[in-house]
Image: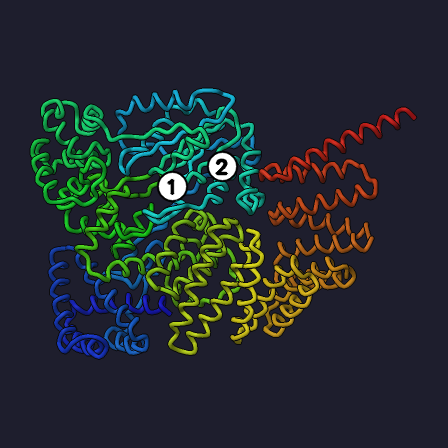
Amino acid sequence: MEAELAALAASGATTLVGLMVTESWTQARARLAGFLRRRRAEEGESEADLQAASERLAAAREAGDDITAAHVQSDWERRLFAVLQAEPGAADELRRLLTELAPGSQRTVISGGVNHGPSFQGSQIHGGVTFHVQPSPPPGPAAVRPDQVPPLTVPFANRRAELALLDRQLGGEAARVGLGVLEGIPGVGKTALARRWAEQARERFPDGQIYVDFAALRGEPGGSGGDVSEAVAMCLRSIGVTDEYIPRSLAERTALYRSRSVGLRVLVVLDDVSEPAQVRALVPKGPGSVVLATGLGRLGELAAVDGASVLSLEPLDAEGGLALLADRCGEERVRAERPAAERLVELCGGLPVALHVAAARLVTGRRPGLASLVAELEDETTRMAGLAVGRGHSVSAVLDPSYRLLPPDAARLYRLLGWLPLETFDAGVAAVAAGLDTASVAALLDVLVDASLVETTDDDRYRMHGLVRLHARGRAVAEEPRAEEAALVRRVLMHFLALTALADRALREDRKRVADLSAFLRDVADPFAGDDGVDPLEWLDAEHVAVLTVLRSAVRHGFHVPAWQLSEAFTVLFLYRRRLGVWRESLELGVAAAEAAVAAAATAAELAQATAAEARLRSLLSRPLLDLGEDDRARTELETAVARADATDDLVLRASVREFLGRYLDRADPSRAIAVYRSSLDLNLRAGEARGAALAAYFLGCAQDAAGDHTEALATLQGAYRDLMAVADRRMAARVTAAIGVAHDHLGDTQSAVRALEEAVQDLRAEGATHYEAQALVRLADIAGRAGDRSGTVREWLTRALEIHEAGGSPLAEPLRQRLDAWGDDQQEDDQQEDDQ
């Protein structure tokens, strides 16, 4: 519902600004004012506001000021949305009014491939999908050499003593793993020093460098904690372990990480750590490896308990600060005005972040000289004490003058970026946040980069230093309208909702969904379509932290309906990439949003949809909970999901939640699982849902086989196979074929079992389902082993299974290798016996 209201508000704002420069504006203004007056405004206020906006728009267009014109539209989009939120029943009247005032005008454009309101001045398309994906490593752990530590993006001309100390502390015994910690106040240069040392020490680590940014894992600027389990998974992927073989628990992941890293000599850089546990879980086992972590403090325990070398980084001294200024501004300028340069270092508290901002003023010519800049900052320190960091100095004393020198449009973007709930962002997202086109925002970002208020990253993105972001946020609170933060969050939310929904549909068109977003997406260009489209799975994987962060922000701001819609669409990622911590949190947020939507529902239709959404999301939540070993909580979620689903008339939903319940019962109560799967099958058949019925039959057949009803299971599975082939789901049909082979084996029909499993192997290989292919191959080898078959075919099965597990970094690879070795020894013994005879 909120998504539709947002689209309508955007469409209304476009129609409104389009009418402002036509001859029919006087009549349109009166009718629009009447609409607003009946909803929220005092007598005469709305018409006066409309006229003022018209005059502002006319002046902007006459001056060629597209940015101000866009601000007019953005402001009215926000105001119309507030009206519709307060009284959703006004939507129909607004639609009729817009149609009468400007027939055929309500079309939408995209921002980053996303529905971001209607067209403005000739259907201008703005935004863009920009993301960085690490190239996939080649098969086999021996070929993997990660090189992930980002390069420095700012000059680094000092800290020689600290670099030498790191060399001494971390370059000792080759038989042990070095552990170092850089701590210090924000802005002191911990990350830059870690990257510089990694750059210089590259040759010491022949097996590569791994990088984990806990700020990025947290997603939200200034957040605390971080998903340690996902961090370990990132490290496992870096050394060649694929998602299929990454264990579900943190303890298992850590154990596998140690086993897989025992023969590697790697550097692991952990940025923005906040807890000792984040470091301990990521220490590799390879002798000569090093872990270098940066943090804000509270990491002294690593020295006391784990033997870490802790280097407390102090602000730059006079010489270090002068070296930085000389590198940025030129040695001659610093030498010519050395007393002023020394005072500038002092005023900046020796903080590199502040010195870079000050130097940018000099480099860009915004100040004639060092002495003039120092005089200005001397005055600021007596009036501004915000963001005081270390030695009592104020970062605001440096940032405020730079901010005031920004052009108005760049200053506004700076303020809004302080509210953007993302650690890193591209120009398209910044454009959405500001309600502008990407080309204009890219130019404004260049202004902010030149002023050192925004920095670029190595993957064509941008980020703000934490202290700069706090300053920007403070200026936004002081200067922006009170409602602008929520409006910005809503714009970014709708951006990611549309992109995620399109990616979801591109990956699994046949997936059950409660949200009907067809109207929302109707006029949105799909960036994932066509041969040259963006890969939807890679986009979702690259942006998963951003999507989760936006989801958190949406729930905090009370955008309940689009929040649960985003959660539902987002879950498609985890059917392919099992990021369990992110999956669980995204669904927990979705459930909370759906519950809130139930409570806020104003109509029977809204109540029904929100209830269905809660049921669907609770059932989905059971999947990561079961994988994480939280079985009791999974049962509670599933029982609630069944109750919510049964309160609706959606037969497919009721069938779906029972299928999820059956998967839990497969572990807890197998006999009851059979009854639940039968119920799911019956509901799907009543709803005419052929694929859903076939899947329920597959799970039912597996449950029957596990319970010992092998004959009945075989019949059920054969029916499921026919139905899946009828809907062209060859991947699932291949899995059913493997299950049929297992049932034949249980019935003692070895010939039929081998035939079915061999067919399943071929089909699974053709579908790229190598994980299931390996399972079928091992099952074939088991059957052959019981029959005493020691042919070369058996060795081929085991060898192929071993290749699959090794390529994915599976912990099952070693047992398979031992089995093959034992098989070879036995074969040699058999051959020797034959020779002796």
Q: Which residue lies furthest to the right in this view?
A: 837
Quick check: can you spot residue 532? no
**Which dot marks residue 238?**
2
Q: Residue 117, percent across and down?
A: 30, 63
On screen, residue 743 above or below 828: below
Residue at image position (53%, 50%) is: 576
Residue at image position (28%, 25%) is: 159
Q: Which colour scheme is used?
A: rainbow
On screen, residue 811 above or below 100: above
Res 110 → quadrant? bottom left
Q: What residue type is labelled 1?
A: Ser
Compare residues 594 and 630 and report the one nearer the observer: 630
Residue at image position (30%, 71%) is: 85
Q: Residue 625, percent across and down?
A: 54, 55
Q: Residue 655, percent across and down?
A: 59, 68
For label 1, the residue is 274
Q: What residue type is labelled 2?
A: Ser
Quick check: can you spot residue 244? yes
